[in-house]
Amino acid sequence: MISQPQARGYIVYLTLLAGFILTTMPLPEWVAAYRPQWVALILVYWCMALPERIGVGIGWTSGLLLDVFTGTLLGQHAMGFSVIAYIMLKLHLRVRVMPLLQQVFTIFVLLLVERLLALWSTGVAGYPTPSLWYWITPILGAFLWPWVYIVLRDIRRRFRIT
């Protein structure tokens, strides 16, 4: 017999799917540079909330899928998501007890690490250096973190995902 938490585990993957949809949704060219790192934010939340179920493997898989969906360098997001999932798994007990405003700084650093790894991988592949607008997405993601946290926490509580 399947226990209730495992039977409701599909909710985690549905939220990641929502992140993929928000990331690949077409936007006007002037707004596309400001697109937050939705999948990374959702992945970080689930690594913090369910560290025994969501980890580096899910981070790598979701990053690889995001690479395929967005047409970026294969492995670029996979490497970044794996690293931030690993860091969050190591720090999840500390971050969970922080007030929400202190979590914002931690999330900013994690999103910045993901961006730095993506920049490094594109630089190694010989792509040109992006403009300074490239660095706005970790800032926007940090500002969005309280809302992402509250929405995903409410989803986790409503569906009793443990």
Image (cartoon, rainbow, N blue to C red):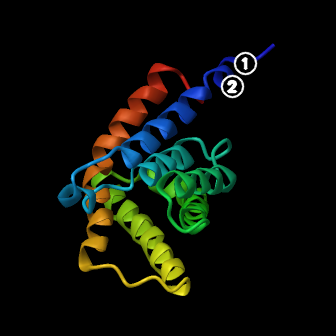
Q: Residue furthest right?
A: 1
In this orientation, which residue lies closer to the viewer: 24 or 101?
24
| Image coords of residue 119 (percent x, y) | 45, 78
| Image coords of residue 78 (percent x, y) | 59, 62
Q: Residue at x 55, y 34 (%)?
A: 12
Disc 2 crowd, CA 10 A, few/some/many (<14, 14-19, 20+):
few
Quadrant of the rendering where the N terminus is positioned: top right
| Image coords of residue 41 (percent x, y) | 42, 51
Task: Say which quarter of the image contains residue 82.
Answer: bottom right
Task: Say which quarter of the image contains residue 134.
Answer: bottom left
Q: Residue at x 53, y 53 (%)?
A: 66
Residue 18's place in the image compared with 126, above or below, is: above
Disc 1 crowd, CA 10 A, few/some/many (<14, 14-19, 20+):
few
- Residue at label 2? 6
Q: Are marks 2 and 1 in contact (CB under 8 Å)?
A: yes
Apparent side of residue 152 relative to residue 4 in the rendered image (left or right):
left
**Label of residue 3 in the image:** 1
| Image coords of residue 147 (percent x, y) | 29, 42
The three-letter amino acid code for the residue at tag 1 is Ser
**Dot 1: what SS?**
loop
Residue 73's place in the image compared with 103, above or below, is: below
The three-letter amino acid code for the residue at tag 2 is Gln
**Dot 2: what SS?**
helix
Apparent side of residue 161 relative to residue 154 in the rendered image (left or right):
right
